[in-house]
Every structure is written in C-alpha cells, then in structure tokens.
Amino acid sequence: MKPIHVGLLGVGTVGGGTYTVLRRNQQEITRRTGRNIIIRMIADLDQERIRTLTAGDNDVVATSDALEIARHPDIDIVVELIGGQTIAKQAILEAIAHGKHVVTANKALLANHGNEIFAAAQQHNVIVAFEAAVAGGIPIIKALREGLAANQIEWIAGIINGTSNYILSEMRTKGLDFDTALASAQQLGYAEADPTFDIKGFDAAHKITIMAALAFGIPVRFDQTYIEGITQLANEDIRYAEELGYRIKLLGITKRTSSGIELRVHPTLIPAKRLIANVEGVMNAIIAQGDAVGPTLYYGAGAGAEPTASAVIADLVDVTRLMTSNPEHRVPVLAFLPELLSDTPIISMEEVETAYYLRLQVADQPGVLADISRILADNDISISAMIQKEHLSARNKVSIIMLLHKTKEKNTNAAIKKIQNLPVIADKIIRIRLEELGN
Ligand SMILES: NC(=O)C1=CN([C@@H]2O[C@H](COP(=O)(O)OP(=O)(O)OC[C@H]3O[C@@H](n4cnc5c(N)ncnc54)[C@H](O)[C@@H]3O)[C@@H](O)[C@H]2O)C=CC1
Ligand SMILES: N[C@@H](CC=O)C(=O)O
Ligand code: NA
C-alpha cells in the first residue's frame, strides 16, 4: 500500500524524538498499521538541526518554511512540534484548509484556540489529534475519550506539569533551591521554551482545560481557569506539610458540582499515603473518577523527547488507521458530538470548596491564638490540626501552622483578610489548598 507521508514541523526536543522513535520502530509500526509511515519533509528554522538529525536519510526534504509543508500536495499528515501560538496556529489552519490531518503536542495553542481549530477540522473532515499535548506519554486523551465513555466523569486531579513536579521533588528530597532545580529541568528538555509557563501554572492550566472539555463535553475555556503556580512555595512549607502527613504537588483539578464546573491549578497538599503523592520527578499522574468505574489512575513520563514522541506517534498510527473512515464514524474530537457540547458554567474560585493549610508568623504573646480562632469561627471555619514552631529567624515570633476543614474559598479569603490585619501578625499569611483525593 502507498506509504503515509508526514510533514514534521519543528525538530527540537519532541520533533527530534519523534523522528528517532519512528525510524527505530518503523517495522513494528508497519506491522500494526499495514502502512509505512514516512517523514517526507521537515521544517525548522535551524537547518543544521535537521541535517544532524537526518544524516544519511536522503529521502527527507528540508525547509525552513513550515507553511510550505502545510500546503504541500505530497503530505498526508502534518505534525506540528514548533510550539507557540503564531506560526504553529497558522500552519495548522493552513494544513486543515488543504485537507491534511494534523497531529500536535501544542497544549497552549489548543487551550487558547482549540474551539476555532476543531471547528475548522470538522468543516474540512480532517482529524486533529493531540495525545502528546496532555501528560506527554500517558495515553490520557485516549482514556478519557474512549476508555471512560460509559461514565459520567465526576472529577479529575492530576500532576500534569513535569517541570514543576521535578522542581518540587528536587527541593524536597535533595534540599535543592528553586533556581537550581529549574535549570536542571530545562537542561533535561522538560521545560517550555518560556519556563514561566511551567512554574507559574499556565502549562498545567492548558492541560486541565483540555481534559475538562473532554471529560464534561464543554468547549475549551482556558480564560476561565484559575491559575496559581509554584513560585511562591517555600521549603519550610514543604517540610511542615510533610510533618503533618502531606506532600505538596502542583495539581490541575476539574470537578463537576451542582452549580457548575471547577477548573483550577494550584499547589495542593495531598495525603502522603496516596499513590499520587509519591509521583516524583518528571513523572505525571492523573486520577479520573467516573460514576461507574470509580477512581482510575494513569501514570507515566509527562515530558521529554521519547516519552512525548510515543504519544505523537500513537496519534500518527491512529490517524493512519482512520483517515479513510467516514468522518461521522470517528471519535468526536472533544469526546462528545460537537453540536451537543454543553454550556455548563465554570464556577468562580470564590465558590470553590476545599480544605486549607495556613502558616502564620505571629508575635509570641498570650491571646493570639484566641483571636485567630475567633475570626475563623466567625467565618464558619473549623481547625482540623495545628502545630506551633519557633520562627526560623526572629526570637519574639512563632510560626503557627493550621489545617482547616473544607470551606468555601470566599470564607477563607474573608478570614485571612481579618487575621492579616491583627497587630500580632508579622508577615504575609501563607495559604495552600488541601485535597484529600479519596477516603
Ligand atoms: N518538551 C517536552 O517535553 C514537551 C513539549 N510539548 C510541546 O511540544 C512542542 C514542542 O516542544 P519542544 O520540542 O520542547 O520545543 P523545542 O523548542 O525543543 O523545539 C521547537 C523547534 O521548532 C523550531 N522552530 C521554531 N520556530 C520555528 C518556525 N517558525 N518554523 C520552523 N521551525 C521553528 C525550533 O528551531 C526548534 O527546533 C511545544 O508545543 C511544547 O509545548 C508537549 C509535551 C512535552
Ligand atoms: N513543559 C511541560 C512539557 C510537557 O508537556 C512539562 O514540564 O510538563
Ligand atoms: Na498524553
């Protein structure tokens, strides 16, 4: 049978991995699909990169113009691995307009412009596949879209940014400082071109936004996602959490509630005994809870050249199998029929209910605890655990660490505001959300 001709846009970390793995496993993949999947053209601004990667492979045509490939009549599938939202978006829309199927790992693009891109793909009867965009090598898109199709998905919580998880692991287990751990993640090829996307929570937000759309059959709504990254986390909070039996992880969380859908990313205390609390380094893990199946857990490498290439090539295999199918028989891009997507609202963070960890630096004098407890009680908040520590640098101060039972975020905000104004409170109150993630 005629081979499938792929045009690869970008041969950095993921593009390079995709080329290498596809070549290495070519025969095995052909045994699966019955077709030879061949990278026919490669575009990269860095021509030297293409030459080094493809040395000895005379069948590959190199160019620096991604749009040339997007329009080229010999190309069946365009794989976009450039990243960003300018040329990547243009090339994807151009490929779709030319009737080509698209595979991309670009979660930033899909979170921000997915609705437009999916509509264009539907109009042109082509597939846009994006397994690599969420949790790298973990086949979570496949699981949510197909494996859990019987369920009403209740919630998803996941460690979905490898760079942040790597940094938190290095800080906790090796006592490394934040900047050293980040530099190491960048060197290993885990971080985004702009690593603030990783550490400020945007990358995890892109991914949870995409998963929420697949889980609940809603459009992609990145602009309504609450985002908080790990840049403010202090080593002492990681240690105190540990003393209380918790680990701090950057989680993406989405949940169906009676008033709407929660969609949020923030550092979160989770019980150390949970499997997901023990996911370290670049590894990702996602819990998806369905009404019929109960909790399911997915684990694997969330970033890096070959793990991500694994997902890109799985999509290439899928597209190869499906490209001749009737478009109406394909799995819908967001798991639900496009005309039946729901307009369930995303609820504001103020209305979200969760438990909390607080750290307060207070003057070491009588009556302080009574004042704090009264303000919490006035806001319907009860304390579930508390420890007191000597302040790390000041003798006349102590650190009070409290765990609060579940309450609405607006209650906690109001209480923190009042407590912060007490004259005995020395520094900014640290607040980290806490989720039990099970019984
Ligand atoms: N690095 C990782 O572990 C993962 C990355 N991703 C996503 O995969 C995509 C690619 O990421 P990486 O491979 O890490 O990036 P990278 O920065 O290593 O590679 C990007 C490549 O695109 C080339 N490029 C840039 N502008 C271009 C243009 N206008 N025309 C042609 N080529 C151009 C660059 O020269 C570079 O070789 C991004 O969307 C990223 O979010 C997704 C999952 C994991
Ligand atoms: N920068 C991302 C790469 C994969 O999506 C991460 O660290 O997870
Ligand atoms: Na994936």
Image: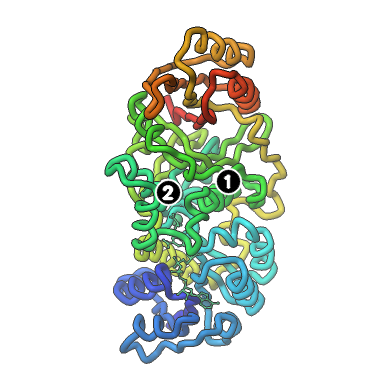
Residue at which label 2 appears:
164
**In the displayed structure image, the side of residue 125 where residue 133 appears, left or right:** left
Mark 1, Cα crowd under 10 Å, few <14 / some 14-19 / many 20+, is many
- Viewer-proximal residue among 200 and 283: 200
Residue 400 marker: none
Chain-order first, disc 2 or disc 1: 2
**In the displayed structure image, the side of residue 273 where residue 86 appears, left or right:** right
**137, above or below 95, in the image:** above
Color encoding of the figure: rainbow
Tell me: is circle 2 under 8 Å from ligand 2. Answer: yes
Type of amino acid at the residue the image marks with label 2: Ser
- Name the front one of labels 2 and 1: 2
Q: Quarter of the picture for ligand 2?
A: bottom left
Considering the numbered disc 2 on the image, is that residue within a helix, a strand or a loop?
Answer: helix
The answer to whether residue 345 shows anywhere in this view is: yes
Of the 4 image quadrants, the one containing the N terminus is bottom left
Residues at marks 2 and 1 touching, judged by CB atoms closer than 8 Å: no
Q: Position of residue 280 (x, y in %)?
A: 33, 45
Q: Position of residue 360 (x, y in %)?
A: 49, 24
Q: Position of residue 67 (x, y in %)?
A: 59, 81
The answer to whether residue 137 shows anywhere in this view is: no
- The residue at 41%/26% (across/down) is 394
- Viewer-proximal residue among 6 and 402: 402
**In the displayed structure image, the side of residue 419 where residue 48 appears, left or right:** left
Residue at which label 1 appears:
212
Q: Position of residue 42 (x, y in %)?
A: 46, 82
- The residue at 48%/64% (across/down) is 193
CA distance for labels 2 and 1: 21 Å
Type of amino acid at the residue the image marks with label 1: Ala
Considering the numbered disc 1 on the image, is that residue within a helix, a strand or a loop?
Answer: helix
